[in-house]
Image (spheres, grey):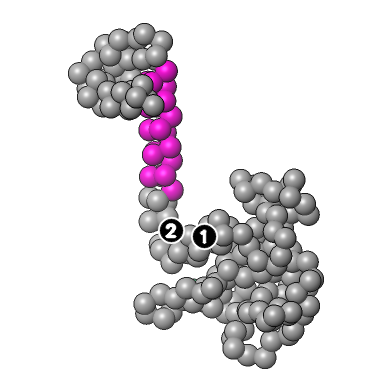
């Protein structure tokens, strides 16, 4: 799977990484086509060049996003057993050489993020954190309502008026009750 920008300047893909600084550029029925990372950060070797062919049973180190511009995403490390699988710490179990779908999706997101300026990445990051904080706040309000607290009390605790608190959270608490 590869992804390209409209201007053709960036072409990225989710690559399987193998020991010896080798990354996959494609696959066949019983083999993986790999190339070697250049010794220094910089543009990656042309994927259409002559690849090395390795047995597909060889265990990968993990997966990461790569882009022809030279960008390398952080590694999603392959876990040694299903019990060690933990998406949050990027330790991933896969029974074959391919990254599971949710990891491939996450890698694509990482690739997309490398296309935008750092200032926009920071906006994205902060917006995600703000949304998470709003969710936690709404949960706390639901708990307070369940505990019999009035909108005036909740508003005072949140630093807003009774009316504002009611307007802002009435639906989340009603929804919760309806469930
Ligand atoms: Zn790129």
Which disc number belongs to residue 50?
none
Of the numbered discs 2 and 1, the one sitting upstream in the chain is 1
Q: Is residue 121 magenta?
A: no
Residue 32 in the image: x percent, y percent?
71, 78
Q: Which residue is mark 2?
A: 118
Q: Which disc number belongs to residue 105? A: 1
Q: Secondary structure at mark 2?
A: helix
Q: Quadrant of the N terminus?
A: bottom right
Mark 1 and ligand 1: say if the CB distance to the nearest ligand atom is below 8 Å.
Answer: no
The crowding category of the residue bearing disc 2, from other C-alpha atoms within 10 Å (few below 14, some 14 to 19, many at least 20), is: few
Looking at the rendering, the stretch of residues picked out in magenta corresponds to 125-143
Of helix, strand and loop, which mostly describes the magenta segment?
Answer: helix
Q: Is residue 85 visible?
A: yes
Residue depicted at x 66% and y 79%: 27
Q: Is mark 2 within 8 Å of ligand 1?
A: no
Horizontal relation, residue 10 to residue 71: left or right:
left
């Amino acid at each position: 799977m590869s992804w390209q920008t409209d201007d053709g300047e960036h072409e990225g893909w989710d690559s399987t990484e193998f020991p010896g600084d080798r990354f996959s550029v494609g696959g066949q029925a019983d083999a993986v086509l790999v190339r070697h990372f250049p010794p220094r950060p910089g543009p990656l070797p042309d994927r259409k060049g002559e690849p090395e062919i390795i047995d597909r049973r060889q265990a990968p180190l993990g997966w990461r996003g790569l882009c022809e511009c030279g960008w390398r995403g952080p590694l999603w490390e392959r876990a040694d057993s299903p019990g060690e699988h933990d998406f949050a710490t990027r330790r991933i179990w896969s029974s074959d050489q391919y990254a599971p779908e949710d990891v491939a999706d996450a890698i694509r997101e990482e690739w997309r993020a490398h296309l935008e300026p750092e200032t926009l990445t920071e906006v994205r990051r902060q917006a995600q954190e703000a949304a998470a904080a709003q969710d936690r706040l709404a949960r706390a309000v639901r708990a307070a309502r369940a505990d019999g607290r009035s909108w005036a009390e909740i508003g005072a605790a949140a630093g807003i008026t009774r009316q504002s608190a009611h307007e802002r959270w009435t639906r989340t608490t009603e929804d919760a009750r309806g469930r």
